[in-house]
Amino acid sequence: MAALIWGGAALSVAGLAGLVWCIVRVWSARRANLSDEELRAVVRKVVPLNMGALFLSVIGLMMVILGIFMG
C-alpha cells in the first residue's frame, strides 16, 4: 500500500506543477500587455492543460486516500 500512497503523491505533485505552470503562463501573458484576442488565444490553449493537471492531481489524491484506507 505504500507504493499506492507514494505513487498518488507523485501524481498529485505532478498535477500541482502543471497547475502552477498554467498560472505562470497566463500571468506572464497578462503582463505582456497582449491584445484581447491574443490573451484569449493564450487562455484557450492553457485551459485544456489546466483541466488535465487538475484531473491528474485529483486522481493522485484519490490514490493516496485509497492507500491510506487499505493500509
Image: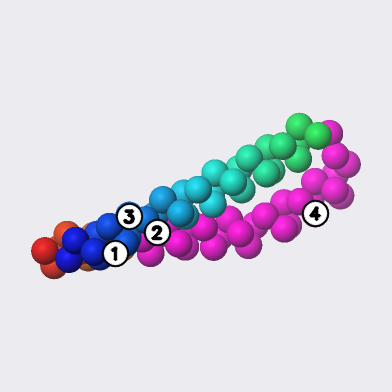
**Residue to which mark 2 is pinned:** 11
- Residue type at mark 2 is Leu
The mark that comes first in sequence, 1 or 4, is 4
The mark that comes first in sequence, 4 or 2, is 2
Marks 2 and 3 close (CB-CB < 8 Å):
yes
Viewer-closest of 34 and 15? 15
Q: Is residue 38 visible?
A: yes
User: Nearer the observer, disc 3 or disc 1?
Assistant: 3
**Residue to which mark 4 is pinned:** 41
The mark that comes first in sequence, 2 or 1, is 2
**Which range of residues does the magenta coloring cover?**
33-60
| Residue in the image at 50% along x and 48% along y | 17
Label 4: how many residues lie within 10 Å, few (<14), some (14-19) or many (20+)? Answer: few
Reply yes or no: does residue 55 show up in magenta: yes
- Residue type at mark 1 is Met
User: Nearer the observer, disc 4 or disc 2?
Assistant: 2
Label 1: how many residues lie within 10 Å, few (<14), some (14-19) or many (20+)? Answer: many
Indicate the secondary structure of the residue bearing disc 2: helix
Indicate the secondary structure of the residue bearing disc 4: helix
| Residue in the image at 36% along x and 60% along y | 60
Q: Position of residue 9 (x, y in %)?
A: 32, 54
User: Nearer the observer, disc 2 or disc 1?
Assistant: 2
**Residue to which mark 3 is pinned:** 9
Marks 4 and 2, how far apart in space? 28 Å
